Amino acid sequence: MKHIVILEDHSDAQQWLRAVAEQALQPDSIAIYGTLSQALAALEHSQPDLALVDLNLPDGSGLEYISAYQQASNTAYSVVTTIYDDDLHLFPALAAGAKGYLLKEQSKSKLVAALQGILEGEPAISPQISLRMISHFRELERKKNLGSELIKQLTPREIEVLSLISKGHTANECGKILTLSKYTVSGYIKSIYEKLEINSRAEATTIALSHGLI
């Protein structure tokens, strides 16, 4: 790992992650960006070997960077570094292309070990996240069977919106992609939730994953 990017807006966390990355991987260089726009601008000129990405940024979502990085590099390796361990953050991140998901609350030694594992082909995933994923996939078949009947009720446009929101896009972003107003998209999302009998984006992502929509 010669070049590493850290996308994180809090200065203390920036230095903490820098120390972790230096100890784990001894890179030639580490670039730190505090905003999404800065990181995306840099991505146009060079792609890192590894990106440690926070999800909540002052000017957008880390998911946007992960997606752009995936498109820019065939060897993109993004690892989410966050405080969030819930499905609403986890699965959209994985769908966007993240290859790892680490909780910043872990000790430095555990984070170092997780990053070192990348060199051995091991995914950088916190134990709590692994357990959540196992639980998720145990439920996947049950939800897939239920979703198979309910998803038949969706219109082609609703299928498109479901696919996009499951990838982490906001209503506004969906509108731009589909050339619709964000209010029209919000109406589709409401209809999707009602037809699928769900209440969250995490549940929508689960159903979309099980039906190959992302």
Image (cartoon, rainbow, N blue to C red):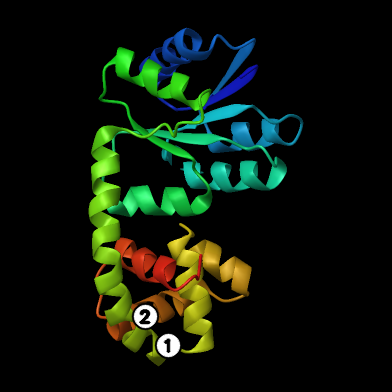
Which residue occupies 31% across, 54% down?
88
- Mark 2 crowd level (few <14, some 14–19, many ≥20, 10 Å Cα): many
Which residue occupies 29% across, 52% down?
87
Q: Amino acid at mark 2?
A: Ile
Does residue 179 sit above or below 2 in this rendering? below
Say whether disc 2 or disc 1 marks the residue closer to the N-terminus.
1
Helix, strand or loop at label 2? It is helix
**Total tally of numbered discs in the picture:** 2
Residue lying furthest front: 120
Q: How far across and how far down the image is residue 77, in percent?
A: 57, 35
Q: Quadrant of the N terminus?
A: top right
In this picture, residue 19 sits left or right of residue 135 = right
Q: Which mark is residue 154?
A: 1
Does residue 150 sit above or below 185 in this rendering? below
The one nearer the camera, 161 or 111, is: 111
Q: How far across and how far down the image is residue 147, in percent?
A: 32, 80
Which residue occupies 30% across, 66% down?
140
Which residue occupies 29% across, 41% down?
130
Question: What residue sits right under mark 2 in the picture?
Answer: 192
